């Protein structure tokens, strides 16, 4: 039995967990490549290359479906999301270049919490107790990781916190966009609309890569792209509450890579802080899944 056949023979939830595991590994390796490349290249250039390579890879796939698939009635929302993603990418890459990979990864888990809160406000839903609890747990964890008043809050830390907020808003926008547009188109526009924003600063800060650098840049772009593709496919197969615990494998992987590749020793405060952040994030997902199940049950009565 060939590997694809074996994979397809697995239960749907098992396939989803495998895909999310691959996404977590790809994300952790993306962090490693960003950290390594930032030693030589500007974050402006890296963000531009990510947008350019992602656009080039995705364009042929969409071309097969016909150019008409790119038509949309949500241009303003796409533009707003592009600004959020571009500014978030700049701050994210800067934080990865300056912070411990484990600390940056732990703080990044605030994104789902912010997404849930922003969607609730956007859709004019009631800010329920579980959502507020998830936000409180996440912020408490962030304070433990950052420890304001006990250590200097760096520009990289502020940048990472902005990234969690901007990406949380961008993820909320993505969910709204997929109500009307094809998910592949939504992903394509994330890269394609970032390219004109990134082009000027990226070219201005250009440093010509060596052949070895191009290999690492290619790996960085592919890992960045496929980490999102694997996550999207995993969430299409199973509820987030089922697959997201696997996604949090990023944290130990980032800590291991940071220790062995960059000599980064995680501080003890990372453990309780990350536990609160992950707990808040997962509680948010669990409560949302329970709410949807309850609404479906009420609708069938």
Image (cartoon, rainbow, N blue to C red):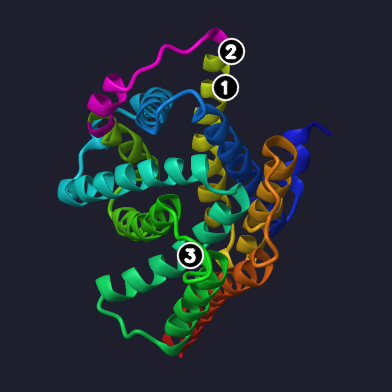
Tell me the residue that label 1 is attached to.
216
Marks 2 and 3 sit apart, C-alpha to C-alpha, by 35 Å
Q: Quadrant of residue 280?
A: bottom right
Asked if residue 221 is positioned above or below residue 214 in the image, the reply reads: below
Residue contact at pointers 1 and 2, CB within 8 angstroms: yes
Query: Most prominent secondary structure in the magenta stretch?
Result: helix
Q: Quadrant of residue 127?
A: bottom left
Marks 1 and 2 sit apart, C-alpha to C-alpha, by 7 Å
Whole-percent x, y for residue 296 in the image: 46, 81
Looking at the rendering, the stretch of residues picked out in magenta corresponds to: 197-212
Q: Residues within 10 Å of mark 3 (few under 14, many from 20)?
A: many
Tell me the residue that label 3 is attached to.
110
Q: Residue at x 30, y 38 (%)?
A: 189
Q: Earlier in the sequence, mark 3 or mark 1?
A: 3
Whole-percent x, y for residue 211 in the image: 55, 8
Residue contact at pointers 2 and 3, CB within 8 angstroms: no
Q: Residue at x 59, y 49 (%)?
A: 100
Q: Earlier in the sequence, mark 2 or mark 3?
A: 3
Marks 3 and 1 sit apart, C-alpha to C-alpha, by 28 Å
Tell me the residue that label 2 is attached to.
212
Identify the secondary structure beneath mark 2. Answer: helix
Whole-percent x, y for residue 51 in the image: 37, 31
Q: Residue at x 49, y 78 (%)?
A: 134
């Amino acid at each position: 039995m060939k590997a694809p056949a074996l994979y397809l023979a697995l239960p749907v939830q098992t396939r989803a967990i495998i895909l999310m595991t691959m996404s977590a590994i790809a994300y952790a390796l993306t962090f490693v490549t960003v950290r390594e490349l930032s030693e030589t290249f500007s974050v402006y250039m890296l963000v531009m290359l990510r947008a350019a390579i992602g656009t080039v890879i995705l364009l042929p796939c969409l071309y097969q479906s016909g150019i008409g698939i790119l038509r949309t009635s949500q241009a303003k929302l796409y533009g707003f999301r592009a600004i959020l993603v571009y500014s978030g990418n700049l701050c994210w890459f800067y934080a990865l270049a300056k912070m411990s990979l484990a600390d940056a990864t732990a703080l990044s888990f605030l994104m789902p919490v912010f997404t849930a809160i922003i969607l609730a406000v956007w859709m004019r839903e009631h800010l329920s107790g579980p959502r507020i609890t998830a936000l409180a747990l996440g912020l408490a964890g962030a304070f433990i990781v950052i420890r304001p008043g006990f250590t200097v809050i760096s520009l990289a830390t502020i940048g990472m916190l902005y990234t969690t907020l901007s990406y949380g808003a961008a993820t909320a926008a993505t969910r709204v966009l997929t109500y009307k547009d094809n998910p592949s188109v939504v992903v394509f526009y994330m890269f394609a609309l970032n390219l004109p924003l990134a082009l000027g600063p990226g070219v201005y800060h250009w440093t010509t890569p060596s052949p070895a650098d191009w290999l690492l840049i290619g790996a960085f772009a592919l890992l960045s792209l496929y980490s999102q593709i694997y996550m999207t496919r995993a969430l299409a197969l199973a509820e987030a509450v089922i697959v997201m615990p696997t996604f949090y494998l990023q944290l130990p992987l980032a800590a291991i890579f940071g220790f062995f590749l960059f000599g980064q020793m995680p501080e003890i405060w990372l453990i309780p802080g990350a536990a609160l952040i992950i707990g808040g994030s997962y509680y948010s997902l669990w409560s949302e899944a329970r709410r949807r199940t309850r609404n479906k049950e009420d609708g069938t009565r």
